Amino acid sequence: MKDAKQLSPAESQQLSDLTKERYSKRYQELGKHIRTLGWGSQEQQAYRFEQTLHCGVDFENASVLDIGCGFGDYYEFLQSKGVKVAQYIGSDLNADFIREAKQRYNDPIASFRNDNILTCQNDDPPSADIGIMLGLLNFNWKGSADNLTYSRQAIQNAFRLVKKTLIVDFLSTQLTDTYPKEDFVYYHSPCSALEIGFELTPHVSLKHDYLPIPQREFLLVLNKTAS
């Protein structure tokens, strides 16, 4: 992998603090609500989740690491679809979300932990077969940090934590005419996302063919080996 710029420890801490503050404020205002997590609606959330089941990845009997799990909604989604995973691990920076998720599930298959993907260590062992990271890379950091550097570091760290596959979603620079561009979100070029993926593995695919929700998005799928 070629050398790439990394966030400094101070930058990583600053972005982590800003993220905690943003979501803690929403939680204090809205409680356990779909909009606390930044989703427009449960229907939009379910549609985005659905795409992970249609990108060539077999979840059946696999262990799954949900990075940025929020309240653990993805586990409920898998159950609703009849997908039987061997283990579900929810990971989130926000301790309030983890507390809510632990209260929500009394299931030996599901566990939750308070983690920071930006600061996980290089020698941390892989946690699961499959990792998903949905919605974490959409906020526009503007003057606080370079978004591509942030995205690269989060993806690199997440890829180390999986044994087989990492699935990441992005808002696309291929905008739709039906929804105005927003200043507070970051739109990734699919080409830039592919470049980040190819720095880690040659086994990369990109899914950019689903409907906007309401903005156009895409999934990047990174495999450790050929599928």
Image: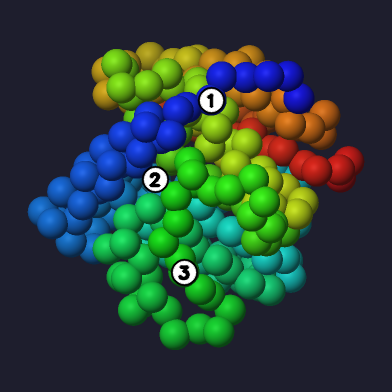
Occupied quadrant, residue 125? bottom right
User: Mark 2 falls on what kind of element?
Assistant: helix
User: Which mark is nearer the camera, 3 or 1?
Assistant: 1
| Picture disc at residue 112 | 3
On screen, residue 170 above or below 80: above
In percent of the image, x 38 and y 53: which residue is there? 93
Occupied quadrant, residue 100? bottom left
Mark before the other along the chain sequence, 3 or 2? 2
On screen, residue 151 above or below 87: above
Looking at the image, residue 164 sits to the left or right of residue 185; the answer is right
On screen, residue 204 above or below 64: above
Q: Please name the residue that numbered disc 1 is placed on.
A: 6
User: Which mark is nearer the camera, 2 or 1?
Assistant: 1
Give the amino acid type for the residue marked by disc 2 in the picture: Gln
User: Mark 1 falls on what kind of element?
Assistant: loop
Q: Please name the residue that numbered disc 2 is placed on.
A: 44
Looking at the image, residue 176 sits to the left or right of residue 200; the answer is left
The colour scheme used to paint the residues is rainbow
Residue 17 in sight from this viewpoint: yes
The front one of 182 and 80 is 182
Total numbered labels placed on residues in the image: 3
Q: Residue 219 at what x, y percent from top left?
A: 60, 35
In percent of the image, x 51 and y 52: which residue is there? 67
In percent of the image, x 21 and y 44: which residue is there? 21
Q: Quadrant of the C terminus?
A: top right
The answer to the question of whether label 2 and label 1 lie on touching residues, with beta carbons closer than 8 A, is no
How far is mark 3 from mark 1, CA to CA?
28 Å
Give the amino acid type for the residue marked by disc 1 in the picture: Gln
